[in-house]
Amino acid sequence: MQSKRTSRMGYRTVGSRAALAVGLLAPLSAAAQSAPEPAVNEATPVAAPVAPAIPPAPYSLPWQLRPAGVGDVVRSDTSVALYKAGETSGSTVASMLLGTYRITPWLAPLVRVGFVRNDDPNAALGTASAFVNPIVGMTAGWKLPHDLRLSAFLGGTVPVGQGGDGPAGMDGTAAAVARGIPARSAMDNAMFAVNYFTAIGGVGGAWVAHGLTLQGEATLLQLMRVRNESFAPEANRTNATAGLHVGYVVLPWLSLGGELRYQRWLSTPNAVKANPKARDTTTFAVGPRFHFKLGKTSWIRPGLSFSRAADEPMTTAKYNILQVDLPVSF
């Protein structure tokens, strides 16, 4: 009897302990099941994916037109012209060195200097060279909607060039200066008008998209004589130049460009009176340009173009012009 009671008591004791454990754990389980989710701070910003920067549209730099923009640039530009006087051949090398530096994102001062060397077929003139008038001025450029660009230039020459104190037909230095004008397709004639101060103003526009560049410009030049009246009979001359450039970026490192250039005397200097065909000049150029990145923002864009004239008097002299262009931007 006693053992049975003990057995029952033992059962009851175990049962009581199990019931107590279940009773204690039940609230904890219920609390765990009903515990709220960790709070999320909805005010904490979530980083959005950053879209990659869109690179600027590739631009085809023109040969003798002004660039459709401003930058920190050093540019060496040399034209080698071969021509004939009768059956005798001659050559002219005209070199330009340009520098610009941005003072604002859209404005940069410009300085350009030039040097010319001529091997004349006339033995009396022979080989001679000269420094020509530098140009100083301000260039500006703006990016507009719809892939358009607008540019402008205002400046003038410094009349310190050589060769202005002799007749071109009798003095080798003067002949070199005169030969430099067609060697540069008559687009830089203000630099070779060494007896004149020339005020220069020009505007240009371009459309740059999908690897294609369409660009045009027009420039007005007012020449005012400042020295050597005996060799510069006109006190004032007025000239204009214009040009069109079409270029296409074939590969990231290669573009092809073509250019049509036009120069016209708006006044009538003595040279035009003597030869009316000298009033205007039309030339065209084609060639490749290469694009190599030097650093994070530095580029070198060497180019080579071939130019011919479309009218007299340059066609009569059978001009063939090779231009070697080496611009470096920083």
Image: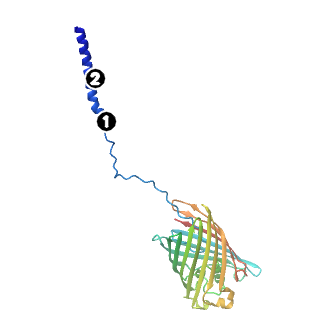
Query: Residue pushed farthest right?
Result: 87
In x, y percent, where is residue 314? 70, 81
Q: What residue type is labelled 1?
A: Ala
Q: Nearer the viewer, residue 59 or 16?
A: 16
The circle on residue 81 is none
Disc tally is 2
Relative placement, left or right, of 34 versus 153 is: left
Task: Identify the mark nearer the N-term, 1 or 2.
Answer: 2
Helix, strand, or loop for circle 1? helix
Q: Nearer the viewer, residue 116 or 46?
A: 46
Quadrant containing the N terminus in the rendered view: top left
Using the rendered image of the protein, determine whether residue 283 is visible from the camera's viewpoint. Answer: yes
C-alpha separation, residue under disc 1 versus residue under disc 2 = 21 Å
- Quadrant of the rendered image containing residue 36: top left
Q: Which residue is drawn at 28% across and 33% down?
A: 28
Q: Badge 2 is on which residue? A: 18
Q: Residue at x 60, y 67 (%)?
A: 212
Colour scheme of the picture: rainbow
In x, y percent, where is residue 204? 55, 76
In x, y percent, where is residue 100? 51, 71
Q: Badge 1 is on which residue? A: 32
Q: Residue at x 69, y 86 (%)?
A: 277
Q: Residue at x 26, y 16 (%)?
A: 11
* In the rendered image, the vertical position of residue 28 relative to residue 198, given as above or below: above
Q: Which of 211 and 37 is in front in this view?
A: 37
Helix, strand, or loop for circle 2? helix
* In the rendered image, the vertical position of residue 183 relative to residue 270, given as above or below: above
In x, y percent, where is residue 16? 25, 21
Using the rendered image of the protein, determine whether residue 184 is visible from the camera's viewpoint. Answer: no
Classed neighbour count for the residue bearing mark 1: other residues with Cα under 10 Å, few (<14), some (14–19), many (≥20): few
Q: Nearer the viewer, residue 108 or 283?
A: 283
Instruction: Kindly indicate whether the residue at mark 2 contacts the one at mark 1 (C-beta within 8 angstroms).
Output: no
